[in-house]
C-alpha cells in the first residue's frame, strides 16, 4: 500500500508546476528537501525508497531526471541513499543511481548516467558521467 501512495504522490508532483507543492509533498513521503529546491516537470524520485533521498537548499533537478535509491539485479536488490548538495544542478534526462552523492555546486550535464559520487564544484557529463574540463 505504501508504494501505491508513493507512486500517486510522485505522479502528481511530476506534472505539477508548483515547486512549493512538490517540496511539501516530497517531505511528506520522507524525503529530505531543503528550501528553494526546484524540480523540473516529469522529474522522478525513487518510488520505493523516497526516504533515502536528500536534496539540499537551492538544488535544481532538471526535466525528466530520475533519482534511484534501488537497483534490481539478477540475484540481489541493492539500495543506497542519494544526496544532492546545495546549489547542485542535475540536467534534464539524467539518471542518478543508488548510493551516489552529488556535492555542493556540482553540475551534471543533461542525459548523463551518474554511477559514482560527484565532488563539490565539479561538472560531469556522459554515460557513465565523468568529469569534464572547465
Image (spheres, grey):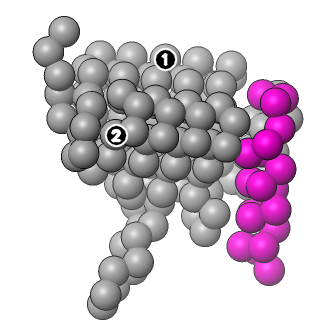
Residue 130 placement (x, y as % from top left): 18, 35
Check disc 2: other Cα within 10 Å, few if <14, some if 14-19, many if 20+.
Answer: many
Instruction: State the separation of the CA atoms marked 1 and 2.
Output: 18 Å
Q: Is residue 37 above or below residue 53?
A: above
Query: Which numbered disc, 1 or 2, marks the residue that appears first in the sequence?
Result: 1
Residue most extreme to the bottom:
75
Start-end of magenta stretch: 1-19
Identify the residue at image location x=50%, y=49%.
67
Identify the residue at image location x=80%, y=80%.
1
Q: Which residue is mark 2?
A: 112
Q: Secondary structure at mark 1?
A: loop
Label annotation for residue 55: none
Q: Is residue 78 above or below residue 80?
A: below
User: Which quarter of the figure is the C terminus placed in?
Assistant: top left
Secondary structure mostly seen in magenta is helix
Residue 110 placement (x, y as % from top left): 41, 31
Check disc 1: other Cα within 10 Å, few if <14, some if 14-19, many if 20+.
Answer: many
Amino acid at each position: 500500500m505504501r508504494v501505491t501512495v508513493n507512486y500517486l504522490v510522485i505522479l502528481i508532483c511530476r506534472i505539477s508546476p508548483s515547486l512549493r507543492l512538490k517540496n511539501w509533498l516530497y517531505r511528506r513521503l520522507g524525503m529530505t528537501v531543503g528550501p528553494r529546491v526546484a524540480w523540473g516537470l516529469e522529474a522522478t524520485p525513487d518510488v520505493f525508497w523516497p526516504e533515502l533521498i536528500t536534496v539540499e537548499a537551492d538544488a535544481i533537478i532538471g526535466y525528466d531526471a530520475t533519482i534511484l535509491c534501488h537497483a534490481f539485479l539478477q540475484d540481489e536488490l541493492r539500495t543506497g541513499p542519494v544526496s544532492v548538495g546545495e546549489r547542485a544542478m542535475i540536467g534534464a534526462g539524467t539518471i542518478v543511481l543508488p548510493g551516489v552523492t552529488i556535492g555542493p555546486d556540482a553540475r551534471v550535464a543533461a542525459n548523463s548516467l551518474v554511477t559514482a559520487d560527484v565532488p563539490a564544484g565539479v561538472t560531469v557529463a556522459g554515460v557513465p558521467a565523468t568529469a569534464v574540463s572547465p
